[in-house]
Amino acid sequence: MSGSRFRRAPAALVMAVVAGTLFAAPAAAEQPTSTRMTSIIPAPVSAQPNPRADYEITGRTAIHAPREAKGVADYLVGVLGSSTGHKLRIEAPKHNPKHGINLVLGGLDRKRGPEAYDLDVTKHGVVLRANADRGLFAGVQTLRQLLPTKSDARRHGWRVSGGTITDEPRFGYRGAMLDVARHFFTVDDVKRYIDLISQYKINHLHLHLADDQGWRIEIKSWPRLATYGGSTEVGGGPGGYYTQEDYKALVAYAAERQITVVPEIDMPGHTNAALASYAELNCDGVAPPLYTGTDVGFSSLCIGKEITYTFIDDVLRELSALTPGPYLHIGSDEAHSTPEPDYLKFIERVMPIVAKHGKTVAGWHEFLKATPPTSALPQYWGTTNSNTEVTEAAQRGNKILMSPANKAYMDMKYDPSTPLGLSWAGYIEVADAYGWNPGTHMQGVPESAVIGLEAPLWSETLENIDHIEFMAFPRLPAYAELGWSAWSTHDWESFRQRLARQGPKWTEQGVDFYRSPQIPWPA
Ligand code: TNX
């Protein structure tokens, strides 16, 4: 049976992984749409495909997992159930794992970190080993990519491509940001986005929860923020907000997918929704109207009023209590209507409030003007390759999160004909999204000073989940690879061939992706 399954890959493909470098797969027409070990995104550290060792998942396949890995095992049952239609059973771990699908905790060199995994696929079964849940989860995403599309499986069975993969990430922080303030997205929309990004081993979701156009998180001590400040959005639509229960559900859903939620309350600018909700937050005591346009830089909290800090303390206390992750993001960008001395005073006053609630402060890189502690996480969004404040912070010991707008902003149009998005930072085709190195991008910021990268998706022009998908796919997998894969695997020709293989899977998942002319999508 297995010999007739697919037209055999040429020997060159079988040997495609040499010294950790992935080469281009052969022309799409020679290949089934299923993903071979040489086609994984993000590229693993090393892959040794063995086309004679494919393993077929059937309704009788069992998943063997220890109790401590029950979360990942349940997740695997879920994803395999929705693709294969088989509800696999979970059984106790085998003493000598070989048959079935085995999740094994422990046994890898500790130095490889919690996200490392080794995956072995033989004719008899799958053995996935990692030191922690996070590694098992990453390996499960690789396993999913080794499955065929539904249409291939109908002809050839649910065959996992055979061979061996050894893998671990380059950077610990691989993020995606979603702006739920300019347009509101429902809990189900965000869950869908979490599902999509987790397939590519993204491990942080930054939620931009408040801006001029809307406040999207219930704060019990300041209820009008959500009920009034959340009641509209860009274009004047109804907006919306997450109750604390909704937000907790999102955080838990993300955690099950090994994603840490990073909540952002942007301040002192980008605060019209808050200022409109509570007159006392304004220096003149007069609440401005709600705002549904797309200008930036016109609003500011009142730096000189004590109530401003009571407000921030309350908001950050409630948000910290709902957020298990280490970071609270205080925005701090584009505070064009806050005079510089006030801005400095404000940031210096707010940082200790974040610390008091047990959290690490993150902010857009402008907040470096206030010289935050070295534990703080600056997020660089500039479009140049040098920035003195960022270099100095890196020298002091801050880790930098890279989100250069001209490379990593998924709200930028792909080209002038893209119907959605903005273009102030340029057009970002897939090759541009892929074509930069976060470890060398900025002068004076060596790889050791980079925590990782994050791809923001601002939503001035995005109104629904289809719009989100169209802007994020296929660029998000490019960022995922920049964040996960060793630079030695970086190869555009290989990447575009591998990306092409994702297209049929997205079609089956109903992902509304952009058919970039740079990618050789299968017919
Ligand atoms: C800049 S970059 C912003 C956002 C906009 C975005 C649109 C940054 C930290 N702020 O307020 O939504 O550009 O691309």
Image (cartoon, helix red, strand yellow):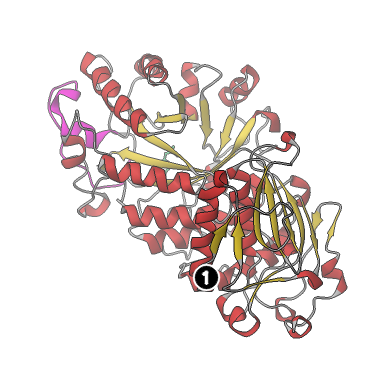
Q: Quadrant of residue 125?
A: bottom right
Q: Is 135 situated above or below 193?
A: above
| Closest to the observer, 51 or 348 | 51
Segment tinted magenta in the rendering: 271-295
Label 1 sits on residue: 83
State whether residue 523 appears in this view. no
Out of 100 and 195, give the one closest to the viewer: 100
Whole-percent x, y for residue 441 in the image: 66, 38
Ligand 1 rendered quadrant: top left
What's under tag 1, amino acid-wise? Ser
| Quadrant where the image shows the C terminus | bottom right
Quadrant in the rendering for residue 475: bottom right
Tell me what residue is drawn at x 25 percent, y 14 percent: 304
Q: Position of residue 57 (x, y in %)?
A: 63, 71
Position of residue 221 relative to residue 503, above or below, is above
Q: Is residue 283 magenta?
A: yes
